[in-house]
Amino acid sequence: MCGIFGYVGDRPCREFILTALKALEYRGYDSAGIATISSKGKISFVKKKGKVANLDDLLSSLPAENTVGLGHTRWATHGVVSDRNAHPHVSQKFAIIHNGIIDNYLELKESLSSSGFSFETETDTEVILKLLEKNYSKELGIEKALLKTVSSLMGSFALGVMVLDCPEVLYILREKSPLIIGQGQGENLFASDLVALAPYTKNFFFLEDGQFARIKKDSIEIKNFDGSVCHPKVVNLSDYELSTNSKGSYEHFMLKEIYEQERIVSSHIEMFYDLAFEKQRELGVGLKDIDLSKYRQLVMVGCGSAYYAACVGQYTLEKHFRIPVSVFLSSEFHQRKMHVGSDTLVLAVSQSGETADTLAACEYAKSTGATIIAVCNTPYSSLTRLADFTMYIQAGTEIGVASTKAFTATLLALMTLSYSFAKKLGTLESDELSKLIQNLKALPEKIKDVLSCAPQYKELAGKYSNCGNFLFMGRGHLFPIALEGALKLKEISYCHAEGYAGGELKHGPISLVTEELPIVAICPTGVFYKKMFSNMEEVAARQGCIIAVAPRENKEVKGIAETVLHCPDVDDPFLQALVSNITLQFFAYYVALKLGRHIDQPRNLAKSVTVE
Ligand code: M6R
């Protein structure tokens, strides 16, 4: 979950590295550090607990003229968040940065300690540094010492290493954590992510697991851990566009991203549907040609919000595919070693395309012969490179840690995939597409309606900011929305929130009902309205406090709920889920705002969870 970056060239690099770390900060913001090396081999470094910006004032203590360096932004796995545990870890001979987890670090630490090594930090990374010191000698050379070192490691790593004895070289090594090299002119760079490299070059090498590279300003050598030389082709991404990371006039990226949903929905509709002729346009190359007849099961995997989006998608995919469709948390899926094979189609849902559990799930599924379709926001991510096909959700870069526009865009992508595949399979009922088109025509207006209620949501949500606990309830497509609404609230407000299927209320959670526990009931007019209303009656009968997500015109709901968060009715349960969720995004946002939380970078979280 950490972000790593390195530069070797002719430019003074300290500011350069700092800028790159700011671009990588979404991967972790517990601490940050930079090390640079002089041409004579003197390593200087700064590191500090907290956000990357905390390095601003320390930067001047690094020599201005150094042109080779490493940077790191940390999401703590082993060892508390502190200056001491921040990377780079530096010894007399080396500076190293690490993204990943060393699973056997305790055994290694014990054995190193008994050979006389002492440790200054609680990190797993320091074990790598000490191993390297133990293994390195001028006679053996750095390359062999590095390979000997990584051969003892179990777990995942993307490592950047700077060596006192060869100050003009950076070494990087990869096992299950992303590493990309950017090839410049008279300079080369590496990073965990394209966002940190794209401002400087369009030519990249994507390192594979079990590879390492020796990078100098005018050369890049890539080898396998067995020492054999690799000749990867440089990938030119001249079409890769960096979106501008500006909040504009919004107070937070999250708020900006909530508002962007209207545009994202409209462009999705325009891209995939011909509203005038009531037709669906073809999917892109690859996806449109996929032979669906051979699949006997469809499995969806994802984590967090991506998982909940998949749970909503399951309803429509199941209806259209007419084969068993199951949804798994990625971590559970690969740990259980599910029965999948060449008759299985896997839809892997991930905004970032870098989520370690989702990648592991796909690697496992792929090894059994399954076909993978990535539903992803990030071009050239590890997931899209691993998958057989990709449906891009086209949400644009999402900066807020809480997923908003990516969730909505994922729902749209799953809906469109489902209808396109139904057409191919011949399972689409005659008037179904035309009904969908009618609903899509109305959708942007419904979203506008929700967005226009922001001031009311702000006022209403503010009333509940002191309630430490919340329960969310929904049925059918709105059950996963209850889960997502609860997740959004807890991650940015730190209030405890749980989501339940309305039908489950009487099976336990009803014992929690008191005047103090707000129950957020997602209750639009539709197939489940009557049953949801009964749930609300049951809560009201016990003096429970109800916050209903329902049209403001619904007098019945108004009569029973303490608060109504207006959400228009939508004549399609799938799209209703999409619209209701935006109301809940606002609710979470305004509760968190009232509480003065770090909305875009909530505590303990990172945008991409790149360790299992
Ligand atoms: O990048 P991914 O979609 O794979 O990320 C999955 C989850 O980590 C992510 O959705 C997380 O739950 C969000 N912070 C929720 O808002």
Image (spheres, rainbow, N blue to C red):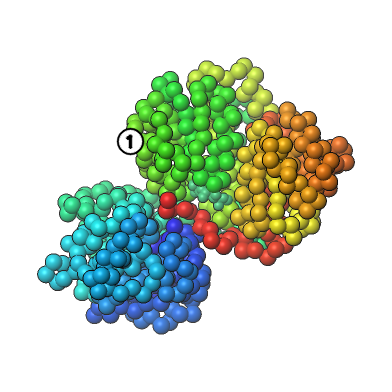
- Outermost residue toward the left in this view: 139
Measured as percent of width and height from the top left, residue 243 is found at 51, 55
332 relative to 517, above or below: above
- For label 1, the crowd category at 10 Å Cα-Cα, with few meaning under 14, some 14 to 19 and many 20 or more, is few
Q: Is residue 105 left or right of residue 489?
A: left
501 relative to 433, above or below: below
Question: What residue is at 57 percent from the left and 36 percent from the top?
Answer: 311
Q: Is mark 1 within 8 Å of ligand 1?
A: no
Give, as a three-letter code, the residue at label 1: Ser
Measured as percent of width and height from the top left, residue 236 is found at 34, 50
Is residue 99 among what the camera can see? yes
Question: What residue is at 23 percent from the left and 56 percent from the top?
Answer: 151
Question: What residue is at 18 percent from the left and 52 percent from the top?
Answer: 226
- The residue that label 1 is drawn on is 367
Quarter of the rendering occupied by the N terminus: bottom left
517 relative to 92, above or below: above
Measured as percent of width and height from the top left, residue 488 is found at 63, 51
Q: Is residue 319 left or right of residue 593?
A: left
**Snapshot quadrant of residue 13:** bottom left
Foreground residue, 393 or 327?
327
Measured as percent of width and height from the top left, residue 135 is found at 20, 67
Q: Is residue 65 left or right of residue 199?
A: left
Q: Is residue 295 left or right of residue 51?
A: left
Q: Secondary structure at mark 1?
A: helix
Foreground residue, 580 or 241?
580
Question: What residue is at 66 percent from the left and 56 percent from the top?
Answer: 495
Is residue 377 among what the camera can see? no
